[in-house]
Image (cartoon, rainbow, N blue to C red):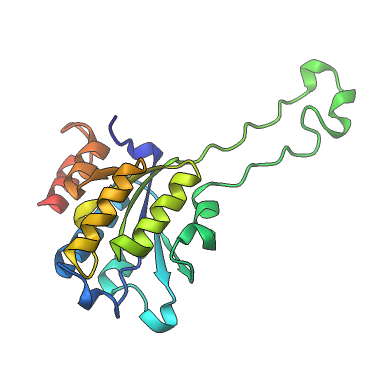
Amino acid sequence: MLLDADDSQLVLVDYQVRLMPAIFENELVIANAVRLARIAQVLAVPVWGTAEDPEKLGPNVPAVQAAIEAAGGKTLSKMHFDAVADGLGDRLRPPVRKAPAGASGGGNARSLPKHLQKPAPEPEVGRSTIVIAGCEAHVCLMQTALGLLEEEFDVWVVTDACSSRSERNRDAAFDRLAGNGAELVTTEMVAFEWLRTAEHPAFREVLALVK
């Protein structure tokens, strides 16, 4: 199974100014987070960010926050390590649209001849695939990913855009996530699976971002 850009959303977790200096390979991780957001922007994949207790840990680093905003994304401030507990899942899943007054099955619609009745609109179907990356991998990233899995999203963790203060904690998070059903991928895997073909109109633009 490959990633589908039309069914994907990107979530970038807690790349915060007071946290990132302590993160293993932080420059690489930040660069890949920015790259993911820019690729998502080119391919019209929705982008979301989170920030844990920003009064203490600060906002996301400027490069990441700018990339989220350039893609039209919003950042959720949270206190739970699992962002789903602070409403992330609700934001990723659109509200079900209510049938307007007069639609079939409600109000005066039933008094109309069948050929004049309008069918109720179908519930809006959201993008169910979440491509996620962030810090720390074994805390907020992992707990948020597990929370999304419990909400029945398909979760793909971008390993080279995730880290912790230590390699051991980072790698333990990846092992646990894989064991719970998350797919482990890299930034380039995401890019080329979203593209699917060198004939994609955005191929050269995305290739430049990857290189």
Q: Residue at horizontal 42%, vertical 57%? A: 144
- Tell me where residue 26 sits by quadrant: bottom left
Residue 180: x %, y % from top left = 36, 43
Q: In the rendered image, is residue 71 in sight? A: no
Residue 49: x %, y % from top left = 39, 62
In the rendered view, does 4 fall on the left or right side of 75?
left
In this view of the protein, which residue sits in the foreground, 157 or 101? 157
In the rendered view, does 204 fall on the left or right side of 72?
left
Q: Residue at horizontal 44%, vertical 76%? A: 53
Q: Residue at horizontal 41%, vertical 65%? A: 50
In the rendered view, does 114 fall on the left or right side of 130?
right
Q: State the residue lying farthest toward the left.
A: 211
Residue 171: x %, y % from top left = 21, 56
- Tell me where residue 99 sits by quadrant: top right
Q: Quadrant of the N terminus?
A: top left
Q: State the residue lying farthest toward the bottom.
A: 56
Residue 94: x %, y % from top left = 55, 47
Q: Residue at horizontal 66%, vertical 32%? A: 121
Looking at the image, is 42 positioned above or below residue 20?
Answer: above
In this view of the protein, which residue sits in the foreground, 88 or 173? 173
In this view of the protein, which residue sits in the foreground, 73 or 184? 184
